[in-house]
Image: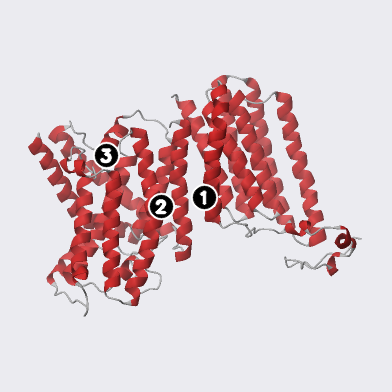
Amino acid sequence: MKAFQLLTQAIALIVAVAAAPLFQGWVNKCRAWLQNRSAPGIWLPFHNIRKLFYKDAVIADGASPLFRGAPYLVFGAMVTAAAIIPSMGSALPLTAAADAIALVGLFATARVFLSLAAMDIGTGFGSLGARREMMIGFLAEPALLMIIFVASMISSTTALPAITENLAARHLALYPSLAFTAIAFTMVLLAENARIPIDNPTTHLELTMIHEAMLLEYSARHLALMEWAAALKLLNYACIGFALFIPWGIAAGAGGATALLAAIPVLGAKLAAAGAALALIETVSAKLRVFRAPEFLATAFLFAVLGLLVHLLLGA
Amino acid sequence: MTLDLQLLNMCAALLLLLSFAMLAQRRIVILVNLLAVQGAVLFAATLLLAWRTGEHHLYVSAALTLALKVIFLPWLLHRLIRRLEVYWDTETLLNITGTMLVGLLIVVFAFGLAQPISALANTATRSSIGIAVAVVLLSFLTMITRRKAMSQVVGFLSMENGLFFGAMSATYGMPMIVEFGVALDVLVAVLVLGVFFFQIREQFDSLDLHHLEALDERRSAGPPASRGAPPSSGRPPSEGHS
């Protein structure tokens, strides 16, 4: 049983790390289709990352070890997060180490190092991006915590696999609280992953950019790791969303190997649908001014708190 | 929990959400549309409750809700907006984010307030009383934070929706005669307020109610053109009144 759990963990990790650039490629492809452009290949992010790994890294004068170390730290944090999110099976030995609240902390750690590295070089764009990232982060974090609290209150635990198993085992019913938190979660996902209403993931050298501004000074393997980490973050958020709001098809602890194998195509289908939905949201919405971002995230927080209150009042 | 109760709870949650949407909305046209949607949700809730409890008078009040709150009053308000040419209502007193956070506190307060009432009630929908109280208080907040007469009327109507929902969840609706009376009151109030809007604009050339705060004997005696407060909208001051 122990060996099986370790195998589950290893498969979940490998699939997550491999699927992240693929998922990003799929979102880009859907976006291009929706915008009537000829779509880039779904493997493009992979080729990009491979190309970057072959190049020689150029590092600015005066960069401290923090700047060199940050890509590994950020990538490591995202891989750790992928290890504790039940994306395919909930029998993950590593999840005992961290519950959903620690997961939010893990994302925060990655954000702190990313911002510090961006400020480390001392260019204007770097600190601009870092400040904006911290602003978005400190507004999005309470909303994300509230979302997790709602799911935790419904299933009375903060361990993500237990929440998933509990929610999947329930009778199919209308949960207004979960509907509200799902909307809040979508908004937080868009804000945290530098998606369109808040930030444009395809922009470079624009005054409105946030995430790309922090990566401007990176090159070669460091940039590859940073981009891979960003793709992995998007995948992690999508998997948290699946675990909380569409928990069906995730192999339970007692499911065995067949359930785990069956969970892989289910995850693929969910990711395909989520990627298309994400591309659709990004296509139909316009980018907000930076100063409207607090309003957007306050709305997300409001939805999450309303979900909590409605759950407390109606018990649903 | 049965499906109809789940749907009723969903309607209650939607009403609360719509109240927040109204609180956050800057445009008067969308505000009226939200009021119509709120009426529609209320209609659906009444119909569901009527079907669930088998009380016939609830069908009548559902029909009344549909006719008055979903169709007639929004139509009337849209017509007023067109005739008065007020499409924007940007002057909220607090900023939107602050208003919404105050709204959250109000919801917590309302839920606490409704706790003893729902403990006394014995209807299946008693847990939604808290939401009804919250809708009423949030509509109050909408009225307080707006300056323009139009959005205050929308807040007033939304408050009536909240009261209606509260009566429905606490006691399966008020007696028929009271319901008719309230419906008539609301209808007359909106008609009279519509006339009022024209009078207010005639006098002050704007629907901004803070002009009314400056009313006193000395100032109201003089002609409006010589008044300190300049007209805020583009229309020239109308003549034709003493």
Read off the chain for label 2.
A
The x, y position of residue A109, in whole percent, is: 27, 57
Q: Are marks 2 and 3 on the same chain?
A: yes
The x, y position of residue A93, in whole percent, is: 16, 40
Q: Secondary structure at mark 3?
A: loop
Q: Name the quarter where the C terminus of chain B is drawn.
A: bottom right
Read off the chain for label 3.
A
Left or right position of B111 against A125: right
Q: Name the quarter where the N terminus of chain B is drawn.
A: top left
The front one of A47 and A305 is A305
In which image quadrant can residue A225 be found? Answer: bottom left
- Pointer 2 residue: A187
Q: Kindly identify the residue that appears in the image at 33 percent across and 61 percent down.
A: A32
The front one of A197 and A62 is A62
Q: For residue B160, which numbered disc appears in the image?
A: none
Q: Is residue A44 visible?
A: no
Task: Give the amino acid at mark 3.
Answer: Ala
Q: Is residue B210 visible?
A: yes
Report crowding for label 3: few under 14, some 14 to 19, many 20 or more residues within 10 A (C-alpha).
Answer: many
Q: Can you name the residue that lies furthest to the left here?
A: A3
Q: CA distance from mark 2 to mark 3?
A: 23 Å
Q: Kindly identify the residue that appears in the image at 20 percent across and 59 percent down.
A: A75
The x, y position of residue B89, in whole percent, is: 64, 58
Q: Kindly identify the residue that appears in the image at 24 percent across and 63 percent down.
A: A227
- Pointer 1 residue: B101
Q: Secondary structure at mark 1?
A: helix
- Pointer 3 residue: A159
Task: Give the amino acid at mark 1.
Answer: Leu
